[in-house]
């Protein structure tokens, strides 16, 4: 570090060679084990979200299709609504891939869309199961 009077109260950071203000610690390097620092949320093209979202949508639509076409009909309306919501979440994921500029914001929108798809699928199948198992 340089003497305090030679560079206007700034210190040179030994690691980067960049000056920083006196009393302020150098920023910590990003922790690669934190969820927000994962490549799928920082540098990905978004293709992985499209592929995994499509697979998840297909797998989650299977029990809903069975409830719609082979169930006793009591939960058919809920199953149709949930299927439409799942497809809407996937459409939002696809729209984010092509409408939002490349970067972490786009990847976070895609991740949020997939999380919403999972929440809708889980709660929808659970509600359908409750309706189907209810007496009467």
Image (spheres, grey):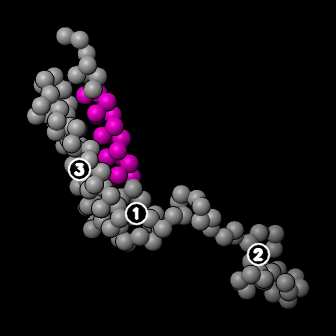
Q: How many tags in the picture? A: 3
Against 58, is 68 above or below?
above
Q: Which numbered circle lies on residue 73?
A: none
Residue 122 is a magenta residue: yes
Q: Which residue lies furthest to the top in this view?
A: 136
Q: What stretch is highlighted in magenta?
A: 112-128
Question: Which of the two marks, 2 or 1, is nearer to us in this view?
Answer: 1
Q: Does label 1 or label 3 sit earlier along the sequence?
A: 3
Q: Is residue 121 visible from the viewing direction of this image? A: yes
Name the residue at 22% across, 22% down: 132
Name the residue at 74% across, 77% down: 20
Q: State the CA–CA distance, disc 3 to disc 2.
A: 54 Å
On the rendered image, what quadrant is the N terminus found in? bottom right
Q: Is residue 81 visible from the viewing direction of this image? A: no
Against 117, is 31 above or below?
below
Q: Does label 3 or label 2 sit earlier along the sequence?
A: 2
Q: Position of residue 43 (x, y in %)?
A: 45, 71
Is residue 48 shown left or right of residue 70?
right
Q: Position of residue 104 (x, y in %)?
A: 44, 66
Question: In this figure, which residue is indicated by the disc labeled 1?
Answer: 107
Q: Does label 2 or label 1 sit earlier along the sequence?
A: 2
Question: In this figure, which residue is indicated by the disc labeled 3?
Answer: 58
Q: Where is residue 8 in the image (x, y as percent from the top left)?
A: 81, 84
Question: Which of the two marks, 3 or 2, is nearer to us in this view?
Answer: 3
Question: In this figure, which residue is indicated by the disc labeled 2?
Answer: 21
């Amino acid at each position: 570090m340089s003497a305090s009077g030679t560079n206007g109260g700034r210190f040179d950071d030994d690691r980067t060679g960049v000056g920083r203000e006196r009393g302020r610690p150098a920023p910590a390097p990003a922790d690669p084990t934190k969820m927000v620092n994962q490549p799928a949320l920082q540098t990905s093209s978004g293709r992985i979200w499209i592929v995994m979202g499509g697979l998840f949508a297909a797998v989650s639509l299977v029990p809903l299709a069975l409830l719609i076409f082979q169930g006793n009909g009591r939960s058919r309306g809920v199953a149709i609504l949930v299927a439409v919501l799942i497809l809407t979440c996937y459409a939002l994921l696809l729209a984010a891939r092509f409408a939002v500029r490349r970067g972490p914001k786009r990847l976070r929108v895609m991740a949020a869309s997939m999380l919403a798809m999972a929440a809708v699928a889980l709660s929808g199948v659970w509600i359908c199961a409750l309706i189907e198992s209810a007496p009467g």
